[in-house]
């Protein structure tokens, strides 16, 4: 008997591919809902053998009402076909905002993580201002944080903030306007009150609501840890795991190039406090940093949707997507304790980011490729690549094809990488 499918809304290509692969581990079919836009990068996920019969909708950033209507029509069709609501997974914050903007209609046909019955909006958890307020109310350690939702809030934030600080939007918009207007940055750093007052006035005039937060200074990449966990409908922590970057580019808050599995009880306890404070049902990604100033771990934010490395966690034994599925389908086994990490570390390698980093930091392409090869050789057997996995090879081959075209003259090196990847 075939299983009930899951509807997955593609926005982040890497995350979307990971989600399909996670569900495929337990033969759970996926209905891909896709849209694109001018200037979009290559959709490597479309090469996956798990990418079948996609449903195309309008780009919500260009025509939100049309996209919402198409999702409603899809929901009606699927409800009629399966006689029940299907699980809907968003693969970016902007996609999550879109779904929740229209969940008063979509809730008739789709379930989403968060509430005890998987059937409510998650604005309180999704908005950073209300998220941080919830953390403060439950004594969860966070940096000094103030919400600035109008010009009346600016003076208090400026006068009471500790500098340097950062500010970021309370809620991303469907078109990701804040990042577009700030050269792709998710947050803006301020060194003093004069600078912040000027910038906050500009943000409010541009229509943004923001949160201002003390900047957390740390010395090593292992002091910035992502902790993942799953809470069932009774608040039991079913699984918990973590990872941290060991290589990033550009330095300081750049994209993760290589990450490794990691676990520490203090971080786990903080993540558990976070998910319990939210009364959250489902998976959650909790971003933490070690504040050397305060000599403790603090919560920076939480991700309500799958993170970019969810397949990496599944490969390490923590398949949060399939646990969500069993929970939503009423098939979750009785609670018998929390699954936590054991065994040797695994490494996640974003090959494209690794090659780009080495190329930008090396004197020649030959030295760059040797540097990348050296890392892959050293960790062979304990590596999970972002796109190349033995059970689903075509996305990995396509990524290599793109890299070969971008960096010609390195065929021997790419040939060796290909052999180690597969």
Image (cartoon, rainbow, N blue to C red):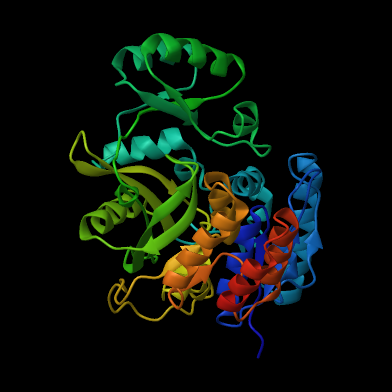
Picture residue at 51% right of the left edge, 42% below the top: 123
- The reply to whether residue 200 is in sight is yes
Residue sitting at x 32%, y 63%: 262
In the image, is 30 to the left or to the right of 161?
right
Viewer-nearest residue: 17 or 377: 377
The quarter of the displayed image where residue 207 is located: top right
Q: Where is residue 260 in the image (x, y as percent from the top left)?
A: 39, 63
Q: Residue at 41% across / 76% down in the picture? A: 317
Number of residue marks: 0
Q: Which of 82 and 243 is in front in this view?
A: 243
Quarter where residue 97 is shown: top right
> Is residue 94 or residue 17 the one in the foreground?
17
Horizontal and vertical percent for residue 59?
77, 46
Q: Which residue lies furthest to the left in this view?
A: 295
The residue at the point 75 percent across, 66 percent down is 46
Q: Position of residue 417 (x, y in %)?
A: 59, 71
Above or below, 122 against 307 in this view is above
**In the rendered image, the vertical position of residue 297 relative to residue 74, given as above or below:** above
Q: Is residue 91 shown to the viewer in this render?
A: no
Report the front residue among 409 and 258: 409
Q: Is residue 323 left or right of residue 407?
A: left
As drawn, the residue found furthest toward the bottom would be: 1
Q: In which quarter of the image is the C terminus?
A: bottom right
Residue 391 in the image, given as x and y percentages of width and height: 61, 81
Quadrant location, the N terminus: bottom right
């Amino acid at each position: 008997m075939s299983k009930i499918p899951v509807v997955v809304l593609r926005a982040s290509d890497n995350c979307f591919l990971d989600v399909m692969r996670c569900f495929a581990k337990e033969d759970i079919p996926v209905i891909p809902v896709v849209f694109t836009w001018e200037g979009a990068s290559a959709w490597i996920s479309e090469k996956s053998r798990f990418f079948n019969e996609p449903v195309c909708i309008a780009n919500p950033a260009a025509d939100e009402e049309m996209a919402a209507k198409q999702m409603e029509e899809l929901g009606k069709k699927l409800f009629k076909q399966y006689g029940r609501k299907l699980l809907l997974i968003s693969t970016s914050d902007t996609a999550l905002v879109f779904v929740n903007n229209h969940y008063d209609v979509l809730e008739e046909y789709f379930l989403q993580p968060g509430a005890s019955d998987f059937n409510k909006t998650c604005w309180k958890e999704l908005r950073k201002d209300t998220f941080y307020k919830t953390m403060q109310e439950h004594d969860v350690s966070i940096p000094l944080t103030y919400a600035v939702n109008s010009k009346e809030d600016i003076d208090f934030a400026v006068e009471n903030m500790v500098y340097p600080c950062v500010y970021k939007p309370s809620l991303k918009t469907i078109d990701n306007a804040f990042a577009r207007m700030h050269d792709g940055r998710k947050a803006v750093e301020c060194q003093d009150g004069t600078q912040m007052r000027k910038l906050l006035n500009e943000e409010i005039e541009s229509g943004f609501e923001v949160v201002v937060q003390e900047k957390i200074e740390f010395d090593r990449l292992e002091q910035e840890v992502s902790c993942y966990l799953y809470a069932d409908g009774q608040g039991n922590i079913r699984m918990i795991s973590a990872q941290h970057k060991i290589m990033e580019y550009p330095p300081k808050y750049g994209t993760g190039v290589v990450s490794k599995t990691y676990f520490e009880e203090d971080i786990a306890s903080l993540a558990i406090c976070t998910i319990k404070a939210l009364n959250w049902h489902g998976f959650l990604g909790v971003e933490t940093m070690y504040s050397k100033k305060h000599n403790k771990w603090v919560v920076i934010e939480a991700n309500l949707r799958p993170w970019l490395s969810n397949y990496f966690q599944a490969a390490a034994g923590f398949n949060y997507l399939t646990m969500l599925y069993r929970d939503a389908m009423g098939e979750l086994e009785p609670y018998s304790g929390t699954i936590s990490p054991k065994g040797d570390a695994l490494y996640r390698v974003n090959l494209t980011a690794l090659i780009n980093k080495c190329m930008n930091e090396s004197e020649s392409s030959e030295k760059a490729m040797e540097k990348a090869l050296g890392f892959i050789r050293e960790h062979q057997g304990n590596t999970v690549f972002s796109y190349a996995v033995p059970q689903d090879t075509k996305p990995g081959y396509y990524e290599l094809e793109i890299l070969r075209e971008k960096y010609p003259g390195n065929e021997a090196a790419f040939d060796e990488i290909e052999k180690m990847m597969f």
